[in-house]
Image (cartoon, grey):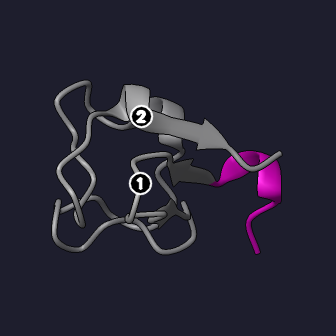
C-alpha cells in the first residue's frame, strides 16, 4: 500500500483527485507502480486536466 508521501492530490478547486501509484491512471494509460515523479511531464489530471504542477504531496 502506498504511503501518503507517495500520493499526490490535485489542488484545483472542485477536483481533489489523488494520484496513487498503487493504482496508476487507467485513463492516462499509466500502469500501476509508476511513482508520481516518473509520470510524463505532459501528464494531466484525469478529472480536471490540470498539469503536474497543480499537485501536492499528501506526505
How far from the left and from the top, in percent, is residue 50?
25, 42
Residue under the image location 33 percent in, 64 percent down: 31
Q: Residues within 10 Å of mark 2 (few under 14, many from 20)?
A: some
For the N terminus, which image quadrant?
bottom right
Looking at the image, residue 14 lies above or below residue 59: below
Occupied quadrant, residue 56: top right
Whether the residues at callouts 2 and 1 have beta carbons within 8 Å, the answer is no
Q: Please identify the quarter of the rendering in which residue 47 is found.
A: bottom left
The disc at residue 54 is 2
Q: Indicate which disc residue 13 carries.
A: 1
Give the residue drawn at x 21%, y 58%. Answer: 48
Q: Position of residue 16 (x, y in %)?
A: 48, 63
Tell which tag, 2 or 1, sits nearer the viewer.
Answer: 1
As measured in the structure, the alpha-carbon distance from the residue carrying label 2 to the one carrying label 1 is 10 Å
- Label disc, if present, on residue 35 of the rendered structure: none
Magenta segment: does it hold 57? no
Which segment is the magenta one? Answer: 1-7
Name the residue rendered at 38%, 65% in the picture.
Answer: 14
At 50% from the left and 41% from the top, the residue drawn is 36
Measuring from the top left, give residue 59's x and y in whole percent: 83, 45
* Residue 4 is covered by the magenta coloring: yes
Q: Is residue 17 left or right of residue 28?
A: right
Residue 52, compared with residue 22, is above or below; it is above
- Counting residues from the start of the chain, the first of labels 2 and 1 encountered is 1
Provide the secondary structure element on which disc 1 rests: loop
Query: Number of callouts in the render?
Result: 2
Q: Is residue 31 left or right of residue 55?
A: left
Mark 2 element type: helix
* Above-or-below relation of 42 to 29: above
Amino acid at each position: 500500500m502506498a504511503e501518503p508521501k507517495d500520493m499526490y492530490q490535485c489542488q484545483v478547486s472542485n477536483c481533489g483527485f489523488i494520484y496513487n501509484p498503487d493504482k496508476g491512471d487507467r485513463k492516462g494509460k499509466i500502469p500501476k507502480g509508476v511513482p508520481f515523479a516518473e509520470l510524463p511531464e505532459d501528464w494531466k489530471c484525469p478529472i480536471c486536466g490540470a498539469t503536474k504542477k497543480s499537485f501536492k504531496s499528501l506526505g
